Image (spheres, rainbow, N blue to C red):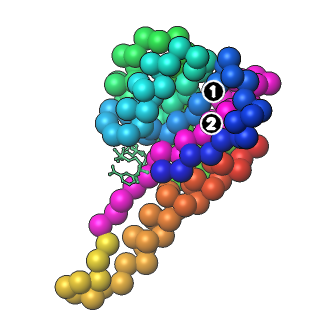
């Protein structure tokens, strides 16, 4: 997981924005982060990204108006661009204070006992965990 933020000195302290990638957010650290940030009343907006928002049941039951759900698959450049536009509509000129790249996969990989090399498995892991994170962070 990677977190990025501006220089804290330049935060609009009254309206911090967050953008998380908790995935489907029915489990895991992403959902816990969403709930934790919403406990703080000085957090203005929390945007949670999910590959399939309609299936994000654990997110959808949170009735806090500060929470927004956007669709995002970090393996797709088109999806990343679309989510950027959605986030832009939500935060306007304020921009984001914090971006948490939480989306990640852990694929089983071993060359033992059969000694098989699995370049495809490594490429899939890097595509989501590395390239997805970099492009999501850089997109504009
Ligand atoms: N738990 C640990 O002990 C631990 C330790 C070190 C690092 N981490 C890292 O911390 C992060 C969260 O861990 P976790 O335990 O909460 O994992 P998790 O429950 O597996 O959650 C990862 C989330 O990433 C989402 N995701 C996967 N591929 C995606 C894609 N292409 N686009 C958008 N979302 C995608 C998944 O969405 P779906 O629900 O749609 O599948 C899932 O909800 C991960 O990056 C993990 O590698 C965790």
Give the number of the disc on residue 109. Answer: none
Which residue is located at x 51 percent, y 30 percent? 48
Q: Is disc 2's CB within 8 Å of ligand 1?
A: no
Which image quarter is the C terminus in?
top right
Which residue is located at x 48 percent, y 26 percent? 37
Q: Would you place residue 21 above or below residue 128 in this image?
A: above
Q: Is disc 1's CB within 8 Å of ligand 1?
A: no
> Which range of residues does the magenta coloring cover?
83-108
Identify the residue under disc 1.
17
Tell me which corner region of the image, top left, top right, bottom left or bottom right, holds residue 94: top right
| Residue 13 drawn at (x, y percent) | 69, 22
Q: In the image as oriented, which residue stretches furthest toward the right?
A: 93
Tell me which corner region of the image, top left, top right, bottom left or bottom right, holds residue 115: bottom left
Q: Would you say 62 lies left or right of 18 here? A: left
Residue 46 visible, this angle: yes
Question: Does the magenta run of residues contain 68?
Answer: no
Q: In the image as oriented, which residue stretches furthest toward the bottom?
A: 115
Q: Would you place residue 139 above or below residue 34 in this image?
A: below
| Residue 86 drawn at (x, y percent) | 66, 29
Q: Earlier in the sequence, mark 1 or mark 2?
A: 1
Instruction: Give the Cα separation between the discs numbered 1 and 2.
Output: 6 Å
Dot 2, how many residues are within 10 Å of its Cα: few (below 14), some (14-19), or many (20+)?
A: some
Q: Would you place residue 52 above or below residue 42 in this image?
A: below
Which residue is located at x 23 percent, y 84 percent? 112
Tell which of 17 and 67 is nearer to you: 17
Which residue is located at x 47 percent, y 12 percent? 64
| Residue 87 drawn at (x, y percent) | 66, 29
- Circles 1, 2 touching at the beta carbon (< 8 Å): yes
Residue 71 visible, this angle: no
Dot 1, how many residues are within 10 Å of its Cα: few (below 14), some (14-19), or many (20+)?
A: many
Identify the residue under disc 2.
98
């Amino acid at each position: 997981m990677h977190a990025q933020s501006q220089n804290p000195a330049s935060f609009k302290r009254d309206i911090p924005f967050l953008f998380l990638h908790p995935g489907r957010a029915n489990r895991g650290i992403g959902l816990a982060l969403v709930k934790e940030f919403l406990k703080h009343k000085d957090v203005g907006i929390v945007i949670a990204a999910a590959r399939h928002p309609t299936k994000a049941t654990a997110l959808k039951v949170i009735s806090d108006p500060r929470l927004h759900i956007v669709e995002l698959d970090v393996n797709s450049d088109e999806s990343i661009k679309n989510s950027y536009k959605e986030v832009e509509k939500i935060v306007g000129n304020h921009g984001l204070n914090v971006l948490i790249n939480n989306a990640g996969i852990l694929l089983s990989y071993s060359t033992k006992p059969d000694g098989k090399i699995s370049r495809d498995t490594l490429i899939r892991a890097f595509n989501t965990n590395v390239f997805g994170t970099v492009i999501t962070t850089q997109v504009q």
